[in-house]
Image (cartoon, grey):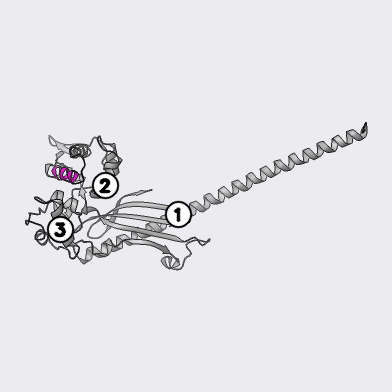
């Protein structure tokens, strides 16, 4: 049996070993925490760099879209789906050739770009629902027909018209009355109106748009549903026949388009056109771990193309 000083020395050694183990565990924990923080900081910096690169690629893509639209404007006032702007850009891997030899990244990550441009005037402009501080009955009726074609409640047309009127200024007794509601910008904004839900907005979104001013519908690009709602005496089947013929050609004026509709309906110049001034650009840029999806509304005039708004996801 161990007694006296020997037992005390053995006990001290045991305590020392336990103390050393605790110190080693504590140091390991601290070092691990420091390495983890360093890793998080490096990842954060990398993600910010990737986001900055993605934004530059997105800006370059919009500049390209502007160039395409300006070149198209110089070729004529007619816009149709056989023109270069209407060709979608599939997933495309970018390399140094797009930056004049400059490296896109230092770690070998590739940049991807995809997107498509749409004629915003191929859709029904819901901003047209207001005229002189009151609902424009011809446009409200057209929206009712569109809702009926899409099998949605037609009473929603009056709801939208009332909301659009409230977001426009108008004259009363020779004075301008300011709007009492913020303007609607995108179809998703309809979710705030009574009677609308996510399914209704999703069904309606491909056929409607909110533009900054009153516009016409381009018969060269409009889908059958929009044409059936706006062309007097037309139905969805007749509009689809017109769209099928349009796939092989385009129309340089409304008279040529009228001849392709059943019954030769009158195409009013305040409702229809063969050219457009607004375009929607849907784009996706992927760089490293960052993926940016954006939607941009462009307004084209004779000499320039401006960004009206841009939304990113």
> What's the magenta bit mostly, secondary-structure-wise?
helix
Mark 3, residue position: 241
Name the secondary structure under disc 1: helix
N-terminal label among 1 and 3: 1
Residues at badges 1 and 3 in contact (C-beta under 8 Å)? no
What span is colored magenta in the figure? 141-149
- Of badges 3 and 2, the one in the foreground is 3
- Of badges 1 and 3, the one in the foreground is 3
User: Image quadrant for the N terminus?
Assistant: top right
- Of badges 1 and 2, the one in the foreground is 2
Residues at badges 1 and 2 in contact (C-beta under 8 Å)? no
Q: Position of residue 7 (x, y in %)?
A: 90, 33
Mark 3: few, some, or many residues within 10 Å (few <14, many ≥20)?
some
Name the secondary structure under disc 2: helix
N-terminal label among 3 and 2: 2
Let me know if residue 278 is in the magenta part.
no
Mark 2: few, some, or many residues within 10 Å (few <14, many ≥20)?
some
Let me know if residue 144 is in the magenta part.
yes
Instruction: Determine which of the numbered discs, if any, sits on residue 52 in the image.
Output: 1
Mark 2, residue position: 205
Q: Position of residue 14 (x, y in %)?
A: 82, 37
The residue located at (17%, 39%) in the rendering is: 170
Left or right: 185, with 236 as reference point = right
Pick the residue in front: 28 or 298: 28
């Amino acid at each position: 049996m161990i007694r006296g000083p020997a037992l005390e020395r053995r006990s001290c050694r045991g305590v020392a070993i336990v103390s050393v183990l605790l110190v080693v565990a504590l140091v390991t924990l601290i070092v691990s925490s420091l390495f983890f923080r360093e890793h998080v900081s490096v990842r954060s910096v990398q993600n910010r760099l990737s986001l900055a690169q993605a934004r530059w690629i997105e800006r370059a893509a919009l500049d390209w879209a502007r160039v395409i639209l300006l070149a198209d404007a110089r070729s004529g006032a007619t816009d149709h789906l056989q023109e270069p702007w209407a060709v979608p850009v599939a997933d495309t891997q970018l390399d140094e050739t797009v930056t004049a030899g400059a490296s896109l990244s230092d770690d070998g990550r590739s940049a991807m770009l995809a997107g498509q441009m749409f004629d915003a005037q191929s859709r029904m402009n819901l901003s047209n629902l207001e005229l002189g501080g009151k609902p424009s009955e011809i446009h409200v009726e057209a929206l009712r027909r569109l809702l009926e074609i899409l099998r949605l409640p037609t009473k929603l047309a009056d709801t939208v018209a009332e909301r659009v009127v409230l977001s426009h200024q108008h004259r009363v007794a020779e004075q301008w009355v300011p709007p009492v509601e913020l303007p609607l910008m995108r179809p998703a904004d309809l979710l705030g109106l009574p009677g609308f839900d996510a399914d209704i907005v999703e069904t309606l979104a491909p056929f409607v748009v909110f533009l900054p001013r009153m516009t016409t519908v381009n018969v060269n690009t409009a889908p059958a549903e929009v044409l059936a709602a706006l062309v007097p005496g037309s139905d969805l089947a007749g509009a689809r026949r017109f769209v099928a013929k349009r796939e092989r050609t385009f129309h340089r004026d409304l008279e040529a388009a009228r001849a392709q509709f059943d019954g030769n309906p009158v195409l009013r110049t305040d409702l229809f056109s063969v050219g457009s001034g607004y375009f929607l650009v849907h784009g996706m840029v992927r760089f490293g771990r960052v993926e940016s999806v954006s939607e941009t509304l462009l307004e084209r005039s004779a000499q320039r193309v401006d960004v009206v708004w841009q939304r990113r996801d």
